[in-house]
Image (cartoon, helix red, strand yellow):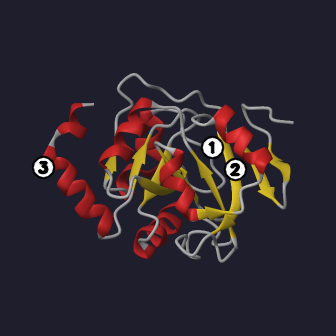
Amino acid sequence: MEIFNDKDFVKELNKKLKNGGVVSFVTDTVWGVGCLPDSEKGVDNIYELKGRDRTKPLILMSDRVEHLLPYVKNIPEKAKALMNKFFPGALTLIFERTEKTPLFVTSQKETVGIRVPDNAVFKRLCEVVDGHVLATTSANISNQPSAKSYIEAEKNIGKYVDFVFQDYGHSAKGLESTVALAVNNEIKVLRQGEIKIL
């Protein structure tokens, strides 16, 4: 992971991201693509390269939950317990968004999903990205299978993004995250993935 220790590269990476750049990376589940959450150009680029339905929101991911908390509000106690137990891990929790979360990330919805992947390479990437948060989705063309390896990510979307980072041996497990809505003190599983919470 020496690339993340290269100050010149990190400077170039952040410059590209600020200008609407998109990167692809390994997580603990499947491979993802991401941009800065406040970059409307970056978000547009993700929807374009994937052919993604604009009604499907992106989610926010980071190496630490502390970086994600400013983007969400009204976190139920049950959800706090889940975050303590399963972050970092294969769980995406959807909360009400704050003003810090742009509507172009959430497909104009008043909610946004957050996740802290349990992967050393993704963690290191977030550490060097300005703001430490990425607006993300899976690294594939819409309605095609999610990429489960560097080769698949490169093949799927490599020519459309600025960087596809190697996994340096920290490979994805290939199982999607569990997605749960956590609003009004209720937890509702929307997609059952690796983690069973109910």
- As measured in the structure, the alpha-carbon distance from the residue carrying label 3 to the one carrying label 1 is 35 Å
- Lateral position of residue 173 relative to residue 8, left or right: right
Q: State which mark lies toward you, 1 or 2.
A: 2
Residue 139 visible from this viewpoint: no
Q: Which residue is at a point 85% across and 50% down the rendered structure image?
A: 188
Q: What element carries label 3?
A: helix
Specify the amino acid type for callout 2: Leu
Q: Earlier in the sequence, mark 1 or mark 2?
A: 2
The residue carrying mark 1 is: 145
The residue carrying mark 3 is: 8
**Extreme left residue here?**
8
Q: Earlier in the sequence, mark 2 or mark 3?
A: 3
Give x and y (percent) for residue 198: 87, 36
Specify the amino acid type for callout 3: Asp
- Lateral position of residue 148 relative to residue 129, left or right: right
- As measured in the structure, the alpha-carbon distance from the residue carrying label 2 to the one carrying label 3 is 35 Å
Give x and y (percent) for residue 172: 53, 30
Give the number of the disc on residue 93.
Answer: 2
- Lateral position of residue 189 relative to residue 140, left or right: right
Q: Is mark 2 on a helix, strand or loop?
A: strand
Q: Which residue is at a point 72% across and 62% down the rendered structure image?
A: 74
Give x and y (percent) for residue 144: 63, 49
Q: Nearer the viewer, residue 36 or 130?
A: 130
Q: Determine crowd level at label 2: few under 14, some 14-19, many 20+ residues with C-alpha closer than 10 A.
A: many
Q: State which mark lies toward you, 3 or 1.
A: 3
Residue 11 visible from this viewpoint: yes
